[in-house]
Amino acid sequence: MGNRIYATYWLETGDDPKRAAEAIAGEQSSGTFVALPTETAELKERSGARVENIEVLETVSSPSLPGGMKGDRYHRCRLTISWPLENLGPSLPNLMSTIAGNLFELKQVSGLRLLDLQLPHEFAQAYPGPAFGIEGTRKLAGISEGPLIGTIIKPSVGLSIEETARQVKLLVDGGIDFIKDDELQGDGGYCPFDDRVSVVMQVVNEAAQRTGRKAMVAFNLTGDLDQMKRRHDHVLAEGGTCVMVCLNSVGIIGLHELRKHSQLPIHAHRAGWGYLTRSPALGWEYAPWQKIWRLAGADHLHVNGLRNKFSESDESVIAAARSVLAPVMPEAPMTAMPVFSSGQTGLQAADTFAALGCADLIHTVGGGIFGHPGGVGAGVEALREAWAAAMSGTPLGQQAERSAALGQALEFWK
Amino acid sequence: MGNRIYATYWLETGDDPKRAAEAIAGEQSSGTFVALPTETAELKERSGARVENIEVLETVSSPSLPGGMKGDRYHRCRLTISWPLENLGPSLPNLMSTIAGNLFELKQVSGLRLLDLQLPHEFAQAYPGPAFGIEGTRKLAGISEGPLIGTIIKPSVGLSIEETARQVKLLVDGGIDFIKDDELQGDGGYCPFDDRVSVVMQVVNEAAQRTGRKAMVAFNLTGDLDQMKRRHDHVLAEGGTCVMVCLNSVGIIGLHELRKHSQLPIHAHRAGWGYLTRSPALGWEYAPWQKIWRLAGADHLHVNGLRNKFSESDESVIAAARSVLAPVMPEAPMTAMPVFSSGQTGLQAADTFAALGCADLIHTVGGGIFGHPGGVGAGVEALREAWAAAMSGTPLGQQAERSAALGQALEFWK
């Protein structure tokens, strides 16, 4: 790998593919629209981005995105470009401008999507990565194996502090491992952050004193930097064990600064991910995107869930989760914990486990827990039993013979 | 307007448009995929987002984006949703999660694009806006009317500090108003930030002592937060009058923190804008996007240029520039300066002026200045004369009768 940065793209172009690739490499390094006498051969050799590989995958008759140059046909290609690290140094913000800057606007491009990213080891020296990751999260949550069984406070916004605390009490009394704020719940007037944390943590701490295990609550501290630091300190002071932040809302510097300040795991929400990924011909795959946030310090990363209620395919969900569990680089794994959510019940446990080969994850389930006729405790137990079945290769029906809670759940999960 | 937030979207849906609109409003406030007994009528009235208006624009037979629900037809609509400010408070990061969060991933959506955003006045109390804007920039640059005539150091990366300084000397001796680093030029090994600033500012300061007017140089300090603050201080100490930052690379907190620290105008680059906007069925128009960054403190905002070398239409460029010049809200204009670039010469001056009705802008021109047979000074003069012609309504040919530099330029500008 040496000290170069490698980015792989899906490219669609109405131009000659090799010429388009060179135009992209030029725009993103020492070239510009016209040949310059000051871009000497020596300068280009030293600082120019290199087209490492381009492979034409297929040819289509019309462009995916408007505004590009017209062609008789449009070639779709897999393109790898590399840059000398020296151009920018190991800096995540400057990396963004380099691998994901102006290139999407080029006329040569009628489709461009970032598929993969390989970084030299200097990035792992310059950035901290997750402080807790899987192991640290398990330790704080008191769950040594299997997934953390979790849920989200609902309605997302609008509950008072007291209503929120009542919902949390039901959950911790039911034995839940993990609870999170909705990404819309920040510091609104009706449920202000500080008071919410104090009242919720009183419930959580009381339960922990009884049971010896403290549910992890991810409080959404998304806000301005000073606010986030102050809120973190408040969560810590009240005995909380996790904070949550919306990545696209605060940006790379927001996460990096929070990571430097935080003494708690950072639960990273990807609200807004849709505008980065929903067009197949544009934007980002999750694999390169989540790598940047892990370097900056994300401990938990949302990946949607199998058979979710959104538009994402199961294939994409699993690829995303695998990328979160894969090392950032061999010498610096920086592994984070994938968070599965959206329309989840115990019915997705076996397929999720089979696809990942491990249960180092957070599984957040709403209706599948709250809707259980035996109550929240039975809902949590049913989820845990579904995961025990998945991990031991036992069919759910057979597992239900030893768990009435699972048996009941199987009648309403769908 | 009261204390509500209003966002307007272009929506395409295979569902009934009104039902889809309600699903979006629900997902982004108190609703979820299933009806919850805890989402009472009173809670929904207080905290629910409201569909203010939906208008079907046209109907098409196939969806723009994959993954959504299938329909016989797909309705394209203009949709306005409002939220009570109380849900989130005047917080730009939480605003992002609310107006541009999960909604893009909904199955009801086969296309969704944010067109407009109206914010209550509390946002202008919570955020500083640009510290310099048009007036402060003009004062520092010593240009009381007409555009700032500018250019970008090229090649983007790869020049040594000495080569950069030689290019700057040519430019300041030629009477340029504004010079910027390329967005790829940060703090690379070959042209480190601190030394570049010191050597360039020596050239700029010497010229200013001779001429009494100091060219404004936007040094790209994009990096981690500590680095950006330190670099800003170095620019200030060396007598510099501007810093530049790549917005998508640092995020909202990056810009907001820089604004709080900075004593200089902030030149805001939009590298990566393409992945947010290039699909017409997804993402962001510039008008709502730039408003958020102006609140956070951007003084100058890139808008591409007429007849540019990228894929953006002239119509989109002008709409973007107008949005930068329009008030953020009547009681807090927070006007910023649009920056025109890409394939620009004096030939775009008249059309740009006619479309905006003013010359409160930065016009960055590369080949149109460097390629002038009379040298950089003649190139700058030709640009200035082209703008004088535009502002007085004089045809370029007629203006050229009194300016040999413009006359020569008209022979090679194209």
Image (cartoon, coloured by chain):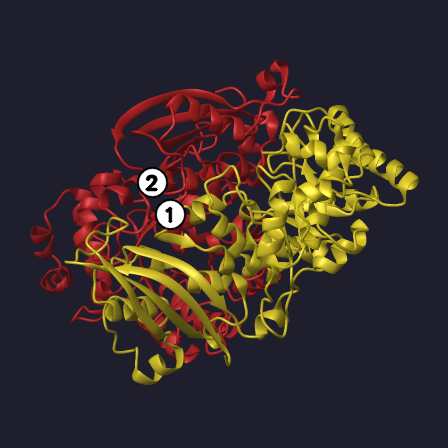
Chain colours: A yellow, B red
Residue A64 seen in the current view = yes
Image point (15%, 63%), residue name: B405
Q: Residue furthest top?
A: B42
Q: Residue furthest right?
A: A210
A42 vs A343, nearest the viewer:
A343
What is the quadrant of the C terminus of chain B in the image? bottom left
Is mark 2 in CB contact (under 8 Å) with mark 1?
A: yes
To which quarter of the image does residue A253 belong? bottom right
CA distance for labels 2 and 1: 8 Å
Assess disc 2: are there few (<14), some (14-19) or many (≥20) residues with their C-alpha within 10 Å of its C-alpha.
many
Q: Position of residue B100 (x, y in %)?
A: 48, 38
| Element at label 2 | loop
| Element at label 1 | loop
Q: Is B307 located above or below residue B127 in the figure?
A: below
To which quarter of the image does residue A174 belong? top right
Q: Is A343 located above or below residue B43 in the figure?
A: below
Q: Which residue is mark 1?
A: A279
The kind of residue on which mark 1 rests is Ser
Image point (54%, 43%), residue name: A271
Q: Which residue is mark 2?
A: B281
Disc number placed over residue A353 in the picture, else none: none
